[in-house]
Amino acid sequence: MIARFQEVKAMGWVKSRRRNNTGIGKTFEDYVGVDENNIDEPDLFGFEIKAHREESSSYVTLCTKAPTFPKRANAYLLNSFGSPNEENPMIKRLHTSMFADHQNTHMGKYAFKLNNNSNTKEVRIEVYDLLTGELLDNQCGYKYEELEKIFAQKLKNLFYVSAERRFQDDVEEFHYTQADIYLQPSFRKFLELLDQGIIMYDIRMGSYQSGKNIGKPHDHGSGFRIKPQDLPLLYAEHETI
């Protein structure tokens, strides 16, 4: 994996292979030989690959995973708490970020919060009435055993790549300059960081806007995220290349 990275680094500036925020990761994966897929396995040589722009301090996605209970939980959340499109009420949207250490505010109406319960071994999504503080819903969430599977499969070895960015004649280019290797993640630490508000959870739900699936839920990648500088808190081993 290190040898592949060093080959790409030695190439200097390379053109982005995709026009959006995922271009930096897709471009690197293309050059190191990762086949694009959605399977719950590491990308290459047992490593999950993440990439970010050096100037960015935004959260990095640890994993995307719909709530494991109840069935079709994301669709339920979208239909129950999503904001309908003014022109077409069939089309709803629910984009919100939440933490376990405090409530957020959403659309001036709801407050979302995570509840990590070590007794039931569940992480639940709680929804409150913003004005009254009443708990409206906590049916959706994750079983510990399902989250632990992600750690064992997807996050065991993380290869985190940094790149410089520039534009040449309106074409985005990257120069991959550094890689951080993270090994041995701790699920116990994950839960601790969740409780401390260091790990964030995003719901990114929308609806198909046309075609035969119009109005049906469309998951844009709900999942758990962390700031890059906090990654060492989650892993036992860290090496910079």
Image: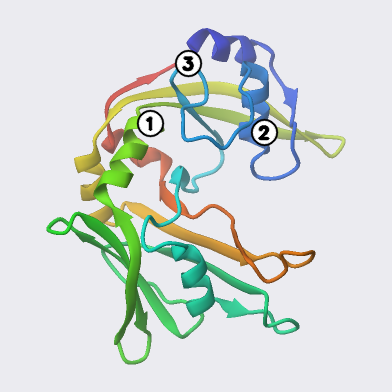
The residue to which callout 3 is attached is 45
Is label 1 in a helix, a strand or a loop? Answer: helix
Q: Nearer the viewer, mark 2 or mark 3?
A: 3
Three-letter code, disc 1:
Gln
User: Would you say 17 lies left or right of 135 here?
Assistant: right
Q: Position of residue 162 (x, y in %)?
A: 54, 29
Q: Which residue is located at x 67 percent, y 33 percent?
A: 165
The residue to which callout 1 is attached is 153
Quadrant of the image occupied by residue 91:
bottom right
Dot label at residue 226: none
The residue to which callout 2 is attached is 165
Measure how far apart labels 2 and 1 are at the Cα level: 31 Å
Q: Position of residue 102 (x, y in %)?
A: 29, 69
The quadrant of the rendering that contains the C terminus is top left
61 up-or-down from 125: above or below:
above
Measure how far apart labels 1 and 3 are at the Cα level: 13 Å
Is label 2 in a helix, a strand or a loop? Answer: strand
User: Would you say 139 lies left or right of 74 here?
Assistant: left
Q: Position of residue 45 (x, y in %)?
A: 47, 15
Three-letter code, disc 3:
Phe
Three-letter code, disc 2:
Arg
